Image (cartoon, grey):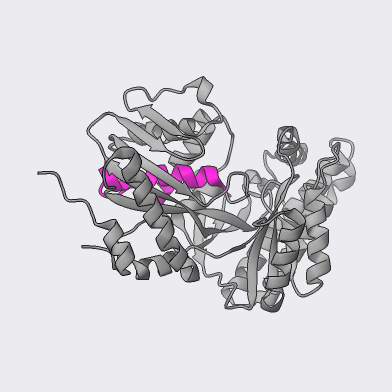
Amino acid sequence: MPLARPDWEGKLKEGTCDGELTFLYGDDAPRQVGRYLETVSAFRSFFGAEPSHLISVGGRTELCGNHTDHQNGCVLAAAVTRDMLAAVTKKREKRVRLLAPPFGLIEVSLEDLDVQNEEAGRPQALLRGVVAFLKKERHTVGGCDIYLHSEVPIGSGLSSSAAFEVLTAYLFSLLFNDDAIAATVIARAGQYAENHYFDKPCGLMDQLVCASGGSLQIDFKDPANPDVKSLTADFDQGGYGLYLVNAGGSHAHLTEAYAAIPKEMSAVAQALGQQVLRQVDPSFFYANIKRLRSRVTDRAILRAKHYFEENDRVSQATQALRSGDMDGFRQIMDESGRSSLELLQNVWPQEDEERSLALALAVSRDLLGDLGACRVHGGGFAGTIQALVPSDLQEGYKRALDDLFGQGACRKLRVRPVGGYELGKGSCAG
C-alpha cells in the first residue's frame, strides 16, 4: 500500500504547525500559513497528488566583509527568513520535475546529467548540476516532483541562486539519504552546479550560509576547508532593524566591473610575491605602496587597502555582536560602507550613468544621520544596499525608501535560525 500523505491543509488550518512556523518566521508566521496552504494547493493542482514533504531554505545577507572572500579573507553573514519553499514527493520515474514560477516546468532526466551548454545561466542548469554532484559523490538520487514558491527575489542581493541550489540538495538528502548529507556537502553541491553547469565562477560563502542557517563568521584562509563559527545576531533586541533596499539599476554589462575587483586585488598580491591578499602581510603592503604604483593602478592599491581594513572589520564586527554591543556594530557597519564607496569603489560603474546605489546611500545617510548605518550590499555597482535603522526611525525610513524606489523596495530582514528545514520536525510531526 502507498504511504499515507500528511494532511497538510488540516494541520496548517488547525494551528498544529504554528510553533514551527514561529520558529522559522517570527511574527510573520500567521502570513506564512496562507503561503504554505497556497503551495500545497498549487502542487496538488499541477501534479494531481498531495506532497509528502514541505521544505524551506532561506536566502542570505552579507553583514560585513565586502569582496573579501575571493582573497581568502573573512566574511560575516547570516541566513534570512525570506525563503524558498518547496512541496515535494517521490516518484518512480527517473526524472525530476520542478514547477517554479515564473520559469515554468523544468525537467531533468536522472539518466542524462552531463553539462548542457545551452542551459548555462538558467535554473535547469543548477538543478542538473546539483543532482550530478550528489551522484558523483555516491549519494542516492531519485525521481521526484517539486513545486517551488520563492520569496527570495531574483537580483535582490539575497542570493536566490544559492538558496535554490541548497534547497535542491537538501530535499535529496531528506528524500533519498535519510537526511544524512552534511551542510558543507550540500553547500559544495550548489557551488559545483554554479561553477560547472550555470557557468558562474562563484565562491562558497552564499551556499554555506544558506545551508547552515543562523549568523556565521567564515574564514576562507583555507578555501577548501573554510573555518565556520556561529554567533547570535539579534538586531531587534538590540534596538535596530536590518533593512535591505533594492535600488534597482541594471546588472547588464556589469560583468567586467565585477571581475575587475578580484583581478586588481590579485594583481597587487602578485606584485608582492603572493597569489591572494590574505597571503600578504598588511605591514608589507603599506611599506610598499610607492613601489606598487609602478606595477599596478592606484585603484588596485585602494581596493587592496579596502581588503585589509575590511578583513579586520569582520573580526571587530563579530566581537561586537558576541558582546551585544550593537552601537559598536553600527559604527563598524558604517565604516564598511564608507570604505566600499571610497576605496573599493563598487557603488557605481566608472564609465556609466548608473547611480542608484549612490542615491540610496545618500538618502539613507540623510534620514539616519549618526543614529544608523548603511553600506553597499554584495557585489555592488547596482542592486541593493543594507541599512541598520533604529527602532523609532524604521517606519519613516521604509516609507521614504519605498516612495523613492517603489513599493516593496525596502524590506526588513530577520535572521533565520536554521538552514534547510522540513516542516514536521516539531509540532507538525505525526
Q: In this view, does 387 lie above or below 201?
A: below
Q: Is residue 162 magenta?
A: yes
Whether residue 163 sits left or right of residue 2 in the image: it is right
Q: Does the magenta stretch include residue 279?
A: no
Residue 298 in sight here: yes
Residue 285 in sight here: no
Q: In which quarter of the image is residue 94?
A: top left
**Figure quadrant of the N terminus:** top left
Residue 83 percent coordinates (x, y): 49, 54
Q: In this view, does 134 lie above or below 380?
A: above
Residue 255 percent coordinates (x, y): 71, 34
304 or 19: which is nearer to us?
19
**Figure quadrant of the C terminus:** bottom left
Tell me the residue at 36%/71% (across/down).
Answer: 19
Residue farthest left in this picture: 1
76 or 113: which is nearer to us?
113
Q: What stretch is highlighted in magenta?
A: 159-184
Residue 98 percent coordinates (x, y): 39, 37
Tell me the residue at 36%/22% (across/down).
Answer: 112
Tell me the residue at 81%/62% (across/down).
Answer: 363
